[in-house]
Amino acid sequence: MVSSGWTLSLALTILLSSWTCLGLVLEQRTPGSAGQSLDFSSYGNHLARRADPILAGYLGVFFLGADPYIYFYLSNGNDPISFKALNKGSPITKPTKGTGGVRDPTIIQGGGNEAGKKWYIIGTDLNIGKTTWDASQRTGSKGIFVWESTDLVNWVNERLVTVEDSTAGMVWAPEAIWDPAKGIKGQYLVYWASKFYPTSDSKHTGNPSNIQIRSAYTSDFKTFTVPQTYINKSPTNIIDLTILPLNGSDGKSFLRFMKDETKKTVFVEVSTTGLFGTWTRPGGDSASIQSGVEGPAAYLDNQVPGKVHLLLDFYGGDGYRPYESTNPASNSGWTASSKTAFPANLRHGSVMPVNQTLYNALKARWG
C-alpha cells in the first residue's frame, strides 16, 4: 500500500520511469490526504488484451442458489453480457463425491503444453442444504472438486482432492491461474479461502483465525505442493479471490479482485511485478467497487481493447449483476452494465472466452 506520508524518492523516480513506458500515470496527492493511491487511468488500454478476431464468444460456468451443481451459459456471439442457458437449463454435471454439492465453480484454461488442449473446472465442496453456515466453516470440507475436459463438452475424472490439513475449518472458492514463471515449464497456482483452529482444538469449537487466502502449486490438479498463506489482511476476513492476467504485457501484470468479508465489499488490487510482487489497492485501504456483494468474476472484452467486465454476486438478492470498465485498475471506475439480456439468479462462477470452433461445439452439444 502507499502510505499517506509518501514522498518522491529515487526509488519512486525509477518506478515512475518504468511505468511511464507502460503508459501509466502516477497521481500525487498532498501529504496527509486520505486514500492516497496510484491512478492507473490508462492501465486497461495499455496492458489489457487487445481485441482478438479469433474469439467468438464467452462460456459462463455458474451454480444456482438452491442448486449446487455445474451450469453452463453461452453468450450471444461476442456480446459479453447476453447469455443463454445450455442443456435446456439443466446441470452439465452433478458431483457424486463429498457433500454432493459444488459451489463457486471456476473454469481454467490449460497452460503450457496443455494450452488449447485441456480445461479444468474446480469448485467448493459444499451443499449448504445438508449443513449450516457455522458448521461449514468449522468442520467443512478440506478438499476441492476437480473435473477435466479436452473439448469443453465432455467432463470427466471427477475427483475431490484434499488441499488443507485438519486445522483448517473449510476450503472455499478455489480458483487457479497458469503461472509461467513457476519452474522450467510453469505450473498452476491454485488459491482458496480458509480459516484455522489451534491444534489443541481438534473439534473446532473455539475461536478461529481470520479468513485468509491460501495457495499451492500443481501441474495436474491431482497432487499439490504444501499450501502457503498468499493473502492475510488480519484481522480482516478475505474470501473469493479471482485473478485476471492483463495480456499484452510482460506476463507480470495482474488485477486481483476479492471480498472483504468483514465489511461485505469487493475491491481490486493491481500488480505490475508478478503474482508474488507488490500489490496496490487503488484509492487506498478503504476503497471498494461495491458493497453487499461477493464472488467477483472478471473477464476481458473480446472486441473492445482494454475493457474488462466484472460480475458481482448480490447474494441477498438476484445474484450476479454485470459491471464494466475501461479503467479496470480502479475501485471507482466501474459502471453497471445493462441487465436486459443477462440471466437472473446466477451465482458465484466464472466466464471464459472461446473461439468459433469451441463455441460451435458447445452449442451443438448443449444448445
Image (spheres, rainbow, N blue to C red):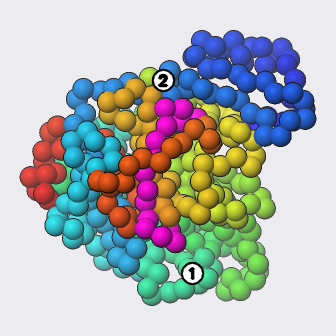
Taking the image as shown, residue 326 lies to the left or right of residue 290, namely left
Q: Earlier in the sequence, mark 2 or mark 1?
A: 2
Residue at the spot 31% in from the left edge and 66% down from the top edge? 70
Type of residue at label 1?
Answer: Trp
Residue 19 position within the rendered picture, expressed as x and y whole percent measured from the top left: 64, 18
Residue 133's disc is: 1
Q: Is residue 340 above or below residue 331?
A: below
Residue 234 position within the rendered picture, expressed as x and y whole percent measured from the top left: 77, 58
Q: Hey, which quadrant is residue 122 in on the image?
A: bottom left
Residue at the spot 86% in from the left edge and 17% down from the top edge? 9
Q: Secondary structure at mark 2?
A: helix
Q: Quadrant of the C terminus?
A: bottom left
**Contact between labelled residues 1 and 2, with CB atoms less than 8 Å apart:** no
Assess disc 2: are there few (<14), some (14-19) or many (≥20) residues with their C-alpha within 10 Å of its C-alpha.
some
Q: Secondary structure at mark 1?
A: helix
Residues in magenta, as a range = 315-329
Please name whichever residue, 137 or 294, is drawn nearer the observer in this view of the structure.
294
Asked if the magenta segment contains residue 250, the reply would be no
Type of residue at label 2?
Answer: Asn
Residue 59's disc is: none
Residue 137 position within the rendered picture, expressed as x and y whole percent measured from the top left: 60, 76
Residue 323 position within the rendered picture, expressed as x and y whole percent measured from the top left: 46, 47
Please name whichever residue, 122 or 332, is drawn nearer the observer in this view of the structure.
332
Distance, label 2 to label 1, CA atoms, is 41 Å
Regarding residue 338, the answer to whether it shows in the image is yes
Which residue is labeled 2 in the image?
Answer: 45
Q: Is residue 2 above or below residue 174?
A: above
Q: Quadrant of the N terminus?
A: top right
Q: Hey, which quadrant is residue 346 in on the image?
A: bottom left
Residue at the spot 40% in from the left edge and 26% down from the top edge? 305
Please name whichever residue, 158 or 63, is drawn nearer the observer in this view of the structure.
63
Asked if the magenta segment contains residue 319, the reply would be yes
